[in-house]
Amino acid sequence: MITKINDVPETLVAFKASEEVVADDFKNIVMPEVSKFTEKHDYLNYMLILDTDISNFSIGAWLNDMALGLQELKNWHRVAIVSDNDLIDSATKIFNTVTIGEFKVFKHKDIEEAKKWASQPKIRE
């Protein structure tokens, strides 16, 4: 399941994934909150804390996560993924080279640093 995290700066939308994550988690929780955020801001600062193994994401959840990425492609600014999984860190580094915005993985012990980094507003050019 995915739950929204409310105790973050207003320049960040954040979620926690735990137990099994399914497509409806993205459709009913993540996507509406991201839409609200990008209506208010012209960028997307996003944080996802993984408190579950990536094997607990259903195929539908992965597809919806990819759909979110494509839907908000022009808005990505900073994305913090909180995970102690080295595979997530490696995949994020690769993804960071081919997309708009900055993506960074933080260890669970560094959640506060992740919030601070990911919540930086976009500087107007």
Image (cartoon, rainbow, N blue to C red):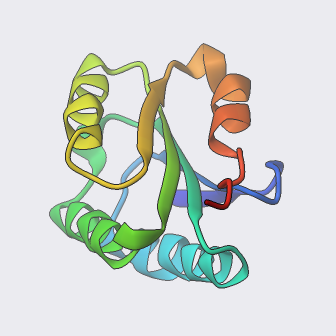
* Residue 102 x, y percent position in the rendering: 44, 42
Residue at 63% across, 18% down: 110
The quadrant the C terminus occupies is bottom right
Q: Nearer the viewer, residue 7 or 79?
A: 79
| Residue plotted at (51% across, 18% down) | 107
Residue 9, percent from left and from top: 82, 51
Residue 41 as seen in the image, left or right of residue 77:
right
Which residue reaches farthest front?
A: 125
- Reply above or below: 116 against 39: above
* Residue 32, image x, y percentages: 56, 82
Position of 123 compared to 98: left or right? Answer: right
Q: Is residue 88 left or right of residue 8?
A: left
Q: Nearer the viewer, residue 15 or 19?
A: 15
109 shown above or below 66: above
Residue 98 visible, this angle? yes
Marks counted in the figure total 0
Q: Quadrant of residue 93?
A: top left
Q: Residue at x 56, y 82 (%)?
A: 35
On screen, residue 16 above or below 80: below
Residue 12: x and y, percent? 69, 55
Q: Work out whether residue 98 or residue 67 is closer to the camera in this orientation and state it.
A: 98
Up-down: is 1 above or below 25? above
Q: Say which residue appears at 63% left-offset and 42% top-offset.
A: 118
Res. 1 visible in picture = no
